[in-house]
Image (cartoon, grey):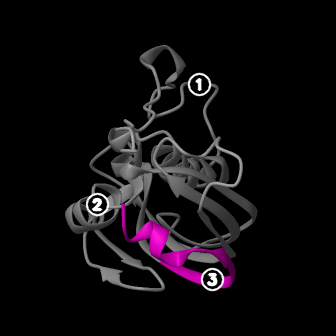
Amino acid sequence: MATPQVNPWVMPEVMKLPIIISPPSTSDREAITDCIHRLILGLDTNDSELFDSALAEDAKWELHIKTLQNRKEIHEQSYDTDIVKLDTTHYVTNIRIHMADSGSEASVSTMYEAHHYRGGRGTIPGAARYSTGGLYFLRLVRDADDAGVWRINYMKMKPIWTEGDRLLVMQH
């Protein structure tokens, strides 16, 4: 029996919030946390605009299997080729933020847990999956050209545990 074609879930417009959250004005810490949430929610809802809004043009992303050198490369070699074809849920917690004296740079550490299923199969009991948990280490910069929006310019992923079929995130 042929496997049915499944289209990835995309967040309906009615459910989307604006990329920049409206007043009351957010503190830098809230804005930095929101940047991380834009990245993660962009992954899980297949919202490429939200995903890209979290990354600086010169962002570097060190995954445990490859290093990507800028926002375009991150989008093309991770978002387009892997994430959009999967049903995913990512959680971040225990976010710690250190602001540089300049007020325009920050270092962040956070714990993550991520679950990956083949597109359209996340709700099928017993479906193949790949789950992982670990740490993200990030550097963020305030984008002076875009109303001071915070963006990630460096992200390193350090897996601590994995479970399931790792090839699932590389083969669709």
Q: Position of residue 121 (x, y in %)?
A: 55, 45
Callouts 2 and 1 close, C-beta under 8 Å: no
Q: Which mark is drawn over residue 134?
A: none
Q: Which residue is mark 1?
A: 23
- Residue 130 drawn above or below residue 11: below
- For the residue pair 38 and 77, the one nearer the viewer reads as 77
Q: Which residue is mark 3?
A: 159
Q: Does the stretch in magenta take in 170?
A: yes
- For the residue pair 25 and 111, the one nearer the viewer reads as 111
Q: Which residue is mark 2?
A: 81
Spatial separation of the CA atoms under disc 1 and disc 3: 36 Å
Structural crowding at the residue carrying mark 2, measured as other residues with C-alpha within 10 Å and reported as few (<14), some (14–19) or many (≥20):
some
**Quick one: SS at disc 3?**
strand
Q: Position of residue 44 (x, y in %)?
A: 52, 46
Q: Does the stretch in magenta take in 130?
A: no
Boundaries of the magenta span: 156-172
Image quadrant occupied by the N terminus = top left
* Point 44% across, 34% down: residue: 19
